[in-house]
Amino acid sequence: MSTQTIKLLEKFIDYCSVKNKVISKNIANIGTENYKREDVSFQEMLDTKMNQMRTTSPKHISFLPMSETQFQIYKDKGMENVSGVNNVDIDKEMSELAANALLFRFSSKKIGDYYRGLQNVIKGGGKL
């Protein structure tokens, strides 16, 4: 696994953390009148980065550092009154929370495996 992949996974974990906070905020405000649910945009940023990574030659470098990436939190302006008070659907929020937890666990496991592999290589370097 390349260091760029590790950086991308670390950024994805940051996204999962922000997404978890936004979902928790939505759930906490399910009874608040005129509250508009919020969401985090990551796919657009990932698509933009992936498009920037395409090159016409293997010698080209067109990759912007991941530190420049930011997540966008936006309000869902849907006018549907799902909960009877606002547009927060508790079933949808709970399913997104579960999916987000799985993505977080997958990413953190992959990063942990990478560093455990490095550690094994370093420790096993002197053994035959």
Image (cartoon, rainbow, N blue to C red):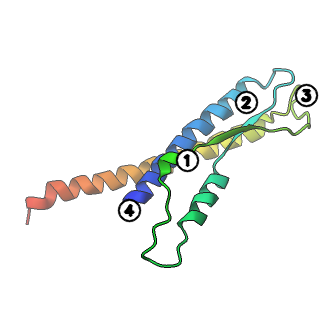
Residue occupying image coordinates x 31% and y 51%: 115
Q: Is residue 3 left or right of residue 119?
A: right
Query: For the residues carrying marks 2 and 1, which lies nearer the camera in this image?
Result: 1
Quick check: 62 above or below 106? below
- Residue under label 1, please give it: 69
Task: Check disc 1 and report its element: helix, strand or loop.
Answer: loop
Three-letter residue code for mark 2: Asn
User: Could you tell which of marks 1 and 4 lies nearer the N-terminus?
Assistant: 4
Between the residue at mark 2 and the residue at mark 3, the CA separation in whole angstroms equals 14 Å
Residue situated furthest bottom in the rendering: 57
Between the residue at mark 2 and the residue at mark 4, the CA separation in whole angstroms equals 36 Å
Three-letter residue code for mark 4: Ser
Three-letter residue code for mark 3: Gly
Query: For the residues carrying marks 2 and 3, which lies nearer the camera in this image?
Result: 2
- Residue under label 4, please give it: 2
Between the residue at mark 3 and the residue at mark 4, the CA separation in whole angstroms equals 48 Å
Q: Can I make out residue 58 in this image? A: yes
User: Could you tell which of marks 1 and 3 lies nearer the N-terminus?
Assistant: 1
**Looking at the rendering, in which quadrant would you find the N terminus?**
bottom left
- Residue under label 2, please give it: 26
Determine whether label 2 and label 1 are within 8 Å by CB: no
Between the residue at mark 1 and the residue at mark 4, the CA separation in whole angstroms equals 19 Å
